[in-house]
Amino acid sequence: MKLSRRSVLTTAGAAPLAAQSPPQKPNFVFIISDDHSHPDLGALGRPVQTPNLDRIAREGIRFDNCFVTSAQCSPNRSSILTGCSPHTTATSRLHTPMPDYEITLIDLLKEAGYFTGAFRKVHQGASFDKRWNFYGGAREPFAKFFDALPKGKPFYLHMGFTDPHRPYKRGVYPAKHDPAKVFVPPFLPDTPEIRDDIADYYNAISRMDMEAGQVLALLTERNLLENTLIFFTGDNGMPFPGAKGTCYEPGIRVPLLAWWPGRAKGGRNVSELIAHVDLPATWLAAAGIPQPKKMQGGSFLPLITGQGSYTPREAVFSERNWHDNYDAIRSVRTRRHKLIFNALPHLPYRPIADLRDSPTWASYLNLARRAELKPEHLRLQQPVRPVVELYDLEKDPWEFHNLADEPAYAGLRENLKMRLSDWMHDTSDYLPPCFPRPGQPAGRNWPMSL
């Protein structure tokens, strides 16, 4: 793809490194898991066997408040490549290919002299796969990329693992987690079937960790580790009812680790809000490449290097659209509060296909038939949903108590409604931003209101 001069030279957001940049451009390795909620790693407090990622967390930087733009695989992955919300780039539907006209991180890096490669899941369509200098399938050895790497070229390597995506196969995983020792999130019932299912989720995470360790070993063997900025994250939340495909915390909050052995002090935790649309801006800043104006995210490189100024995010925004069923949801989350807008409140919760076929959903429905669900588990059984949900995440981290109709929270509700409406308008959302400011029409002059 030939880039327009305007697209590269028009900049916005955080400035790239200038005088601080080393003579040699940094390499990038991006490791992304599939359906993986925060904090489901050993180093983050869950009983999961993840020694390789734990090393990155221990020697690198943990970002404790990282959020996806979409609680769905391919839409969120498009955001990591474009720095835009999925609805901005017409990629909000699951499996929608990246439009050929969209200029992405990969195109910008290639123009700057980077050798780009990917293994396994990219999920942006067959046409996009051709943009990489190197594309390795599911069975190719990881060393093949490094063998193909031109001498002296900086590189960007995307490692798209499919674990811990469903379906799970009992007894095939190298690691074996004891169901009695797993953590059952409070939004799920605690049954033997669900414990077994979570154990397999842990087993799949551990398999992904083992393969990530192979990449780290290759970087060490080829003397590339010191000049390589490594990121690890998940593409959306865990594949369990009430998580993946929702804008609740387990659906949109994911792990994020950064490790740059030669440039950044490790052993740190960062609590600032980070959105996945911020990732490409951060890579571009580290490479000294101007950020295109269209990108909606901003670089958080100063949080990694400790150099330069950084303006903290006040909020992150997420969405849900068509998966194998359609559910239009938008959310805005600050450090303490979250507002969720359900655009189809007349419909009940409908799990997406891989969750609907899971042992966890079968166990949940069995409890529901016997009227044995606890009050905190009934949300997924309601015939309708509220248009607006509002949560105080400090007091109610599992989002059990909707405060949207509480008089004491009326001012906060209006503030977050306006933030969400403004974001929907500014990012060209196809949904009407139906929260008007007093005395003003909503968004693009639609006379809609709650």
Image (tube, rainbow, N blue to C red):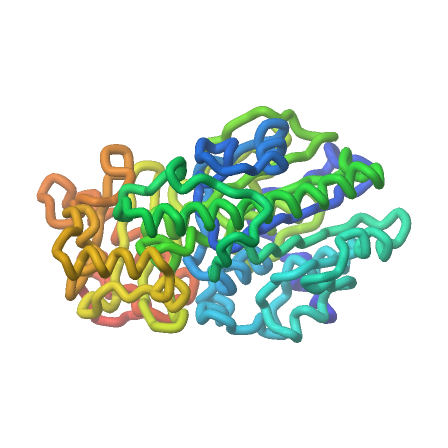
Seen from this angle, which residue lies furthest right?
151
Tell which of 169 and 212 is nearer to you. Answer: 169
- 419 vs 68, left or right, is left
Seen from this angle, which residue lies furthest front?
171
Tell which of 269 and 222 is nearer to you. Answer: 222
Q: Is residue 350 above or below residue 54?
A: below
Q: In the rendered image, is residue 113 in sight?
A: no
Q: Quadrant of the N terminus?
A: bottom right
Q: From the top left corner, tell me how far across and down residue 38 is, in percent.
A: 44, 42
Seen from this angle, which residue lies furthest left?
407
Q: From the top left corner, tell me how far across and down residue 370 is, in percent.
A: 14, 57
- Residue at image x 60%, y 69%? 102
- 119 vs 405, left or right, is right
- Residue at image x 70%, y 67%? 4
Q: From the top left corner, tell me how far across and down residue 330 is, in percent.
A: 33, 59
- Residue at image x 67%, y 51%? 290
